[in-house]
Image (cartoon, rainbow, N blue to C red):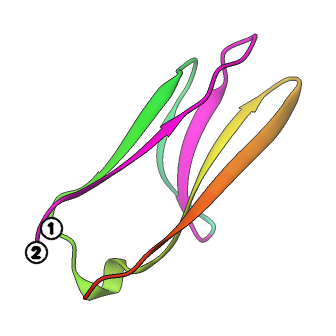
Amino acid sequence: GTPVELGCEAEGRPPPLLSWFRGGTVLREEPVSTGLKLVLPRVEPDHAGTYSCVAENRHGRHNRSLQLHVA
């Protein structure tokens, strides 16, 4: 039931589109950004899983994933 904040930062030219995903679902997206936070206000056991941040511009795409465990 406590909040969790996940952060993601990326730089590029042109500035990237940053997106947070859980599975194939987009949770948050911000164009032309260097940082994007995903806030889960009240974490429950069903929030556990893999979250991915994707940075994409016309030159390519990079991503990082993390595994959230809820006890």
Residue 53 lies in the magenta stretch: no
Give the left or right position of residue 56, taking residue 59 as reference: left
Instruction: Check the image and report above or below for 47 versus 16.
Output: below
**Going from the N terminus, do you reach mark 1 or mark 2 first?**
2
Residue 14 locus on image (x, y percent):
74, 11
Q: Which class describes the residues within 10 Å of circle 1: few (<14), some (14-19), or many (20+)?
A: few
> Residue placed farthest to the top in the image?
13
Disc ID at residue 60: none
Dot 1: what SS?
A: loop
> Residue placed farthest to the right in the image?
59
Would you identify the image quadrant in which residue 24 lies? bottom right
What residue is drawn where x is 89% and y is 24%?
59
Give the left or right position of residue 67, taking residue 37 as reference: right
Where does label 1 land, which residue?
A: 42
Residue 36 locus on image (x, y percent):
44, 34
What residue is drawn where x is 70% and y is 49%?
63
Q: What segment carries the magenta color?
A: 1-23
Residue 14 lies in the magenta stretch: yes
Dot 2: what SS?
A: loop
Instruction: Check the image and report above or below for 34 versus 63.
Output: above
What residue is drawn where x is 80% and y is 39%?
61
Q: Dots 1 and 2: beta carbons under 8 Å? A: yes
Give the left or right position of residue 49, taking residue 18 as reference: left
Q: Quadrant of the C terminus?
A: bottom left
Residue type highlighted by circle 2: Gly
Where does label 2 land, which residue?
A: 1
| Of residues 43 and 23, the one drawn nearer to the viewer in this rendering | 43
